[in-house]
Amino acid sequence: MGSVNVIVGWENYFKNILPNHVKGIDVVLDDSCNKVYTFRINGGNVTITGEGDLHDTNFNSQRWSWDPTEDASEFSVEEGCAYTINIYPSKELEDAYLTSKPMFYAVAVAIIFIFTALVFLAYDWTVQLRQNKVLNAATRTQAIVSSLFPKNVQERIFRDVEEEVRQEEKSKIPNRGFLGNRTKDQLKTFLDVGTGDDAQKYSGPASLKSKPIADLFPEATIVFAE
């Protein structure tokens, strides 16, 4: 009667079963003969950590166990030791996947959204302030014109101003009203008209080239009464 014994290293079964970037898996090999060994898997490499259960006990709740005799006939044991494979993660594996970068990205995105909202609010406030100034200036100008001229003359003045604005837009002449107070700029244009280069470039409603706003009466009847 004879016997044949074959010794096969368990680490050969654990080689090249994980991608190279997966590191820090502890495999605890336990058998019914009270022999326990711990292996560390780093990618495709396997090393023996030592005899006994040497895994990090902080990860006991994440254990995954497998009995080879349940799924593979080659591991069936009639007489001898039955094996159980217990797999645990480690601190190295946890550190590879737990990072504070998502929090930093979330904070950065939140800051960008807040900054964008503040910019829109500031722009809206600036536009509203400018519109209020323009509205107040237009209201005062209309009140002055209404107090100085009759209604038909007022309408003629406003038509002349609208015509001037349309001509400036067509000819691309710079509008000084966008750089400051339009009423003040028109007054300055009127005072400077006929002198310098502005006389050739601009023709505001108050310049000498503007249309007359008074009505022409070629004939009139004069009555003297006492």
Image: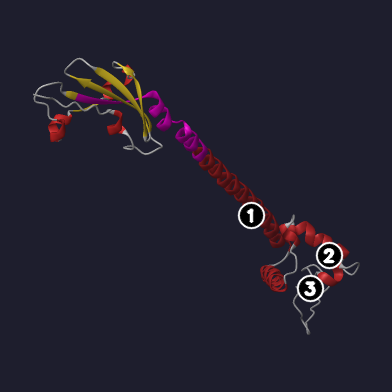
Q: Which mark is residue 190?
A: 2
Q: Secondary structure at mark 1?
A: helix
Say whether marks 1 and 2 touch (CB < 8 Å). Answer: no
Q: Is residue 103 magenta?
A: yes
| Rendered image quadrant of residue 19 | top left
Span highlighted in magenta in the image: 84-109
> Is disc 3 surrounded by few (<14), some (14 to 19) or many (20+) residues within 10 Å?
few
Disc 3: which residue: 210
Q: Secondary structure at mark 3?
A: loop
Distance (Cα) linking label 1 and label 2:
23 Å
Q: Position of residue 20 (x, y in %)?
A: 40, 37
**In terms of sequence position, does the residue under pointer 2 or pointer 3 come before the other?**
2
**Residue drawn at 65 percent across, 51 percent down:** 130
Distance (Cα) linking label 2 and label 3:
11 Å
User: Depth check: 210 or 177 in front?
Assistant: 177
Q: Farthest residue to the right: give it.
A: 195
Disc 1: which residue: 135
Classified by dominant secondary structure, the portion drawn in magenta counts as: helix
Q: Quadrant of the C terminus?
A: bottom right
Figure check: 102 above or below 128: above
Identify residue type, mark 3: Ser
Give the number of marks.
3
